[in-house]
Image: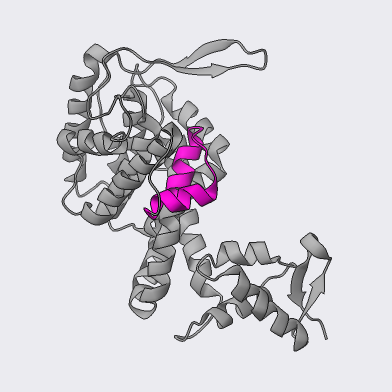
């Protein structure tokens, strides 16, 4: 019989690596809070960009792929969805917006979980908002095209009760002052994924619930640097951590630590990427020109326009190109390579 017990999080014997990651996140979180008051316009721009990347990344993990141009149009509500994939995109957009706008009143309640799922699949004819009616399995295909069951989630007949037990266990654990709320989140998400309570959309729901719980605990870097896109960029490691932590889950012998570490590393990467938007410049006046200049001058290796655009997504490619041109003309930096391979580096004296 499956039961949920998070008391291991308070025994003081957690791996030092997890504690180090948690401390690093807390330090960067404090810096983010200070910068929000100084640079509200930058954070507004980053949030707008992150929403598009989150919708793209979370759906791409599940094989739902459309052009970046169409994703931006749908997320920004400049166009209605035209096919099934675009309906999936629009649904995730709405569920993500619900979390961004209402995370303070939403919670890990059955009604809210089902409501988010209903919103996420609201454009799909089959709809959502109910637990699975039939058993499901997580399969994988080997190099020879042969399918095999990688994990058998909770049976449909036991799903409602198991979800109720999970929610109660989570609520109980978060009232324990000896348990770090940040460490509790990925444990809940792992158990949610192992239950696999829905016939469709479990992976996307897990990422929406991750954001909801992170926001409610004050960790909102995912609002400005897409948490989902960070998972997508290293999804092989994500799936391996999930595989390791789900081994023995039904027998209550699994270890949460691999998934916990991957989750925290992903969040830390969000904070590090957010820090890059500001750490390139010292002082309170942070203009786009100063940020581009400092990004190039502080880079130890030649850096391309595309790499600068990734670090500074709220600065347009045209602006970046103009600033780089001025810096080359002034003799501050020099070009390395040509055409598409062009990069820039501080000019050596």
Residue 80, given in percent of the width and then of the height, sits at 38, 45
Image point (51%, 32%), residue name = 63
Residue shown at 62% from the left, 72% from the top: 318
Residue 71 falls within the magenta-colored stretch: yes
Q: Is residue 272 above or below residue 171?
A: below
What color scheme is it? one colour
The range drawn in magenta is 53-77
Q: Is residue 298 above or below residue 342?
A: below
Count of numbered tags: 0
The residue lying toward the viewer, choosing from 235 and 3, is 235
Above or below, 230 against 43 in this view is above
In the picture, the quarter occupied by the N terminus is top left
Q: Position of residue 250 (x, y in %)?
A: 34, 17
* Closest to the observer, 150 or 327: 327
Which of 104 and 85 lies nearest the eye of the viewer? Answer: 85
Q: Quadrant of residue 223?
A: bottom left
User: Percent position (x, y) of residue 15?
Assistant: 44, 43
- Residue at 54% across / 38% down in the picture? 235
Residue 264 is at least partly visible in this image: no
Against 152, residue 305 (above or below) is: below
Q: Kindly tell me whether residue 38 is visible in this rendering.
A: yes
Picture coordinates of residue 284 (x, y %)? 44, 85
Tell whether 4 sits left or right of 286: left
Viewer-closest of 37 and 176: 37
Report if residue 89 lies within the magenta region: no
Q: In what quadrant of the picture does the C terminus appear?
A: bottom right
The quarter of the picture where residue 255 lies is: top left
Main secondary-structure element of the magenta-colored stretch: helix
């Amino acid at each position: 019989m499956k039961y949920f017990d998070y008391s291991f999080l308070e025994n003081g014997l957690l791996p030092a690596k997890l504690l180090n990651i948690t401390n690093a996140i807390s330090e960067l979180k404090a810096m983010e809070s200070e910068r929000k008051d100084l640079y509200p316009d930058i954070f507004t721009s980053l949030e707008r960009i992150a929403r598009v990347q989150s919708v793209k990344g979370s759906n791409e993990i599940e094989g739902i792929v459309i052009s970046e141009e169409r994703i931006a149009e749908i997320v920004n509500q400049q166009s209605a969805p035209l096919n099934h994939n675009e309906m999936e995109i629009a649904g995730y957009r709405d569920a993500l917006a619900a979390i961004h706008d209402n995370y303070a009143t939403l919670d890990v309640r059955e009604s809210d979980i089902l409501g988010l799922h209903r919103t996420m699949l609201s454009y799909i004819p089959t709809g959502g908002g109910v637990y699975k009616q039939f058993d499901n399995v997580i399969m994988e295909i080997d190099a020879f095209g042969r399918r095999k069951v990688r994990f058998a989630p909770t049976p449909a007949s036991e799903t409602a009760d198991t979800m109720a037990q999970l929610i109660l266990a989570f609520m109980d654990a978060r009232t324990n002052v000896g348990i770090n709320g940040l460490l509790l989140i990925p444990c809940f998400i792992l158990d949610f994924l192992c239950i696999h309570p829905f016939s469709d959309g479990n992976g996307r729901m897990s990422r929406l619930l991750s954001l909801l719980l992170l926001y409610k605990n004050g960790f909102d870097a995912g609002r400005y640097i897409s948490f989902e896109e960070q998972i997508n960029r290293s999804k092989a490691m994500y799936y391996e951590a999930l595989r390791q932590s789900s081994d023995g889950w039904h027998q209550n012998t699994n270890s949460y630590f691999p998934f916990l570490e991957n989750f925290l590393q992903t969040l830390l990467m969000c904070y590090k990427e957010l820090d890059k938007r500001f750490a390139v410049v010292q002082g309170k006046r942070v203009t786009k020109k100063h940020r581009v200049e400092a990004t190039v001058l502080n880079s130890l290796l030649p850096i391309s326009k595309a790499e600068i655009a990734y670090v500074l997504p709220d600065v347009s490619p045209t602006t970046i190109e103009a600033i780089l041109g001025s810096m080359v003309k002034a003799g501050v930096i020099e070009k390395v390579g040509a055409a598409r391979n062009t990069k820039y580096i501080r000019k050596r004296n």
